[in-house]
Amino acid sequence: MSDENNEIDDSKKPVTDEIATVEKDIYMDYIGRTLINPDKTLKTEGGGKGIELYEDLLRDPEIRQAMQTRRLAVVGREWEIIPGSEKATDIKIADYVKEVLLSCNFDNGRKALLSAIVLGYKPAEIMWEYSEGSIWINRFIGKPSRRFTFDMDNNLRLITLKNMIEGEAVPSRKFQVFAWGSENGSPFGYGLGSSLYWMDWFAKNTLKFWLIFADKFGQPTAVGKYPTGATTEQQGKLLDAIDTIQTEAAIAIPENMIIELLEAARTGSMDTYERLCNYLDKKKTKLILGQTLTSDVGEKGSYAASKTHEEVRQDFITADADELCESLNDQVIKWLVDYNFPNVKRYPRIWIRTEDEEDLKPLAERDKLLVDMGVPITKKYFYDTYGIPEPQAGEEIVSGQQTADVGARASRPKNGNGEFAEDKTFPDQIAIDNLIDSITPEQLQEQLNGVLKPVIDLIKTGESYGAIMEKLSTSYPEMDSDAVEQMLSRAIFISELWGRINV
C-alpha cells in the first residue's frame, strides 16, 4: 500500500483480463467469427453432420434407456429456491421465482437441457409472457443442438438457410444453454457422445455381421443338379424350385433333377456375436450411469454389489444437479429477477436436493432416551439435527396437547362420502371446550380476585371443614346450604380451568 494515497502498487495488482483467449487458441478452429466444435470425433467421423452425429445416438435403445434413468434421477429430486439473504425483500423475490417455475413445464425443460450429457450443449428456448404487470415463463422448449453455434465471444447463434455458416444472432435472455462437462471454457461443452459413438458404432456393425451369420448358417444352402444337356428353360425351373425351398414346405421337380442341402462348416462359437453385443451394451450403460448392476444384475450379480455401484451413480447425480443449477442460476433465474425486480444485488439460487432423506426415527428414539436419563443436551442441537426452524419471538408455539387434538381430529372415522363422520361430543363438553378457548388466564384470575376471593380467604383461614361452613353461613346468612355447595363447586371448577389454561 502507498503511504500517501493508499493505492495498490501496480506491480502487485492482479491481472484481471483473460490471457488465453479463443483468438490465441491454436487448437480452436473457426470460420470468420464463428467457432467450430473442437470435438475430435465430430471432426473425423462427422462427415458434415456435426453434432447431429451425437443426436442420432439418443435413438439407440440402450443409450435412450440409460439417459432416461440418469435424467430422471435429477429431475425427480426435490428442489428449492434459496433467497439471496434473510431480508424480507430477498425472500419475496425467491418466492416469486419459485411460483413462476412451478407454473410452467420446468421439469420438461430440465430434462431437455440434460441431453447435454451426451451432446455437450443443449439450448432451450424460453417463452416469456406478461401477466398482471409481471413477466412470467410460459414454458421451455428444447431445441436441437445442431441448429446452433457460437461466436468468438461464446454468444449463441442460430443457423438458418440465409446464413448456414456463421448463423444469426439471437435475442438476449431468450435461450437457456446448458454446457455439460466443459473443462476448458468451451461453450460446446464436452459430452459423452465422443466415447459413446465408438461403442455404438461397433455394436451396430457387430449386429450387422450377426445377421449375416444367421442368414448364412441359420439354414443350409440349397444346391440343384440337372443332367447334361438340360435346356435353359429347365435350368431356370430348377432355380425357381431352389428359391421356393426358402418359403414353401413342399416343391415338385423333374425326376432327373436333384436338390441337395449343403451345411456350411462353422469354426467359431454360435454365441460370439451375442456376447459381443451384450458387452458393448453394458459398456454404454456403464459410461452413462457409472455402473450396470442396478439396471442389469444378471446371474452373477448380488444385492451388495448393486448397492456399491449405486453409490458410484450417486456421484453422477450430484454432479449433474450441481452443473444444471449453476447454469440455471447464471441465466434464466437471473433474467427472471432482472425483468421483475430492478437493482437486485443478491439473486436467489436454485438448489436440488440429491441426498436421500435420513431416517430420523432411530436417532429421535436415542435422543429421547438420553433426555430421559438426564443427559444435558442443548435445544440448538435438536433444531440443527432435525432441520426444524427455531421459533422467533411472537410466533405461536404448538404444544403437545394441541398436536394430540389435531391428531385425534384427523383420526376420526370417515363416512361413505369420504368426509369426517359427525363429531359425537356432547353439547355440554363443546360448551366447556369453547369456554376454555375463549377465556384467558387473566380473565380467570380476575374472577378469582373478585367474586370468589372472599370464599378462598375463608378456606385459607379455616381450621376444618365444619369451621369453614360455619363461617360461610355467618358471612352469607341468607344463602342456603345448596347455594354454598354450588359456590364451592364453582370455585373448584374455575380453579381447575385456570390451571389447565396455564399448562
Image: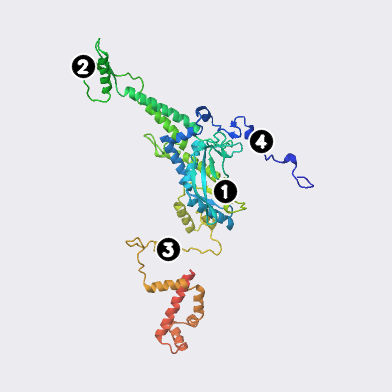
**Mark 1: which amino acid?**
Trp
Specify which label sits upstream in the sequence, 1 or 4: 4
Residue at which label 2 appears: 254
Q: CA distance from mark 2 to mark 3?
A: 95 Å
Q: Secondary structure at mark 2?
A: loop
Q: Nearer the viewer, residue 35 or 417?
A: 35
**Mark 2: which amino acid?**
Pro
Specify which label sits upstream in the sequence, 2 or 4: 4
**Mark 4: which amino acid?**
Ile
Residue at which label 4 appears: 19
At horizontal 44% and vertical 32% (from top left) the residue drawn is 283
- Residue 406's tag is 3
Q: CA distance from mark 4 to mark 3?
A: 65 Å
Estimate the x, y position of residue 61 in percent, counting from the top left.
41, 35
Residue at which label 1 appears: 335
Specify which label sits upstream in the sequence, 2 or 3: 2
Q: Secondary structure at mark 1?
A: helix
